[in-house]
Amino acid sequence: MPDASHALTDPLPPRRPDTGFLLAHPAHLVALGFGSGLSPVAPGTCGTVWAWGAFLLLQNWLDAGQMGWLVALSLPLGWWACSVTARHLRSADPSSIVWDEVASFWTVLWVLLPAGWAAQFAAFLVFRLFDMAKPGPMGWADRRFKGTGWRGGFGIMVDDLVAAFCTLLVLALWRRLW
């Protein structure tokens, strides 16, 4: 007969989020990008598209300074929400958590203000490339800061912030050279 106490110490498998999970805690709502992270296909891209649309919508009511405060507040809020949600999903970096894309892409769009559609679309493409492929510094940050608890939430956020910085660097170089 198997030892019953061993079954109690086995880690539970990762949880798959659904609408009920999304609405069960405010951190889930934020971390899952208000539902955009529930997409079964390319949740990170869906989260980035949601971020772009939300940013464009918010520009109707907020000036550049207020958008800056929103971006600044989205970072610690995201750290908290990603930490809580990853723990509840029992996974270090679940693909359904997309607030890292949201806060990071908001950062890119805010720095680019004012920017037309072509610049925003270029930023979207470069950011997604860096976030998905994780070359160089993005891969280093992704590996270096993985973890659980509060470190895990920071680890989820930091590689996308590095991708945002690199996106801005590429766009600045492109603008400077052409």
Image (cartoon, helix red, strand yellow):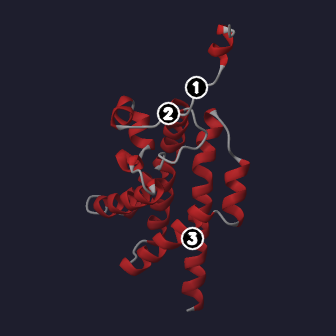
- Of 133 and 83, which appears nearest the observer? 133
**Numbered disc in front, either 1 or 3:** 1
Whichever of callouts 1 and 3 sits on the residue coming sooner in the sequence is 1
Answer with left or right where residue 106 lies relative to residue 14.
Answer: left
**Numbered disc in front, either 3 or 2:** 2
Answer with left or right where residue 22 lies relative to residue 96.
Answer: left
Secondary element type, mark 1: loop
Task: For label 3, count other residues whose C-alpha is less than 10 Å away and answer few (under 14), some (14-19) or many (20+).
Answer: many
The picture quadrant where one finds residue 102 is bottom left
Residue type highlighted by circle 1:
Leu
Task: For label 2, count other residues whose C-alpha is less than 10 Å away and answer few (under 14), some (14-19) or many (20+).
Answer: some
- Alpha carbons under labels 3 and 2: distance apart: 32 Å
Secondary element type, mark 2: loop
The picture quadrant where one finds residue 152 is top right
> Residue at label 3?
167
- Alpha carbons under labels 2 and 1: distance apart: 8 Å
Residue type highlighted by circle 3:
Thr
**Residue at image x 39%, y 62%?**
49
Counting from the top left corner in percent of width and height, residue 17 is at 43, 37
Quadrant in the picture for the N terminus: top right
Answer with left or right where residue 70 lies relative to residue 91.
Answer: left
Callout 2 touching callout 1 (CB < 8 Å): yes
- Of 92 and 158, which appears nearest the observer? 92
**Residue at image x 65%, y 21%?**
10
Q: Is residue 143 above or below residue 172?
A: above
Task: For label 1, count other residues whose C-alpha is less than 10 Å away and answer few (under 14), some (14-19) or many (20+).
Answer: few
> Residue at label 2?
15
**Residue at image x 73%, y 49%?**
144
> Residue at label 1?
12
Residue type highlighted by circle 2:
Arg
**Residue at image x 58%, y 87%?**
176
Callout 3 touching callout 2 (CB < 8 Å): no
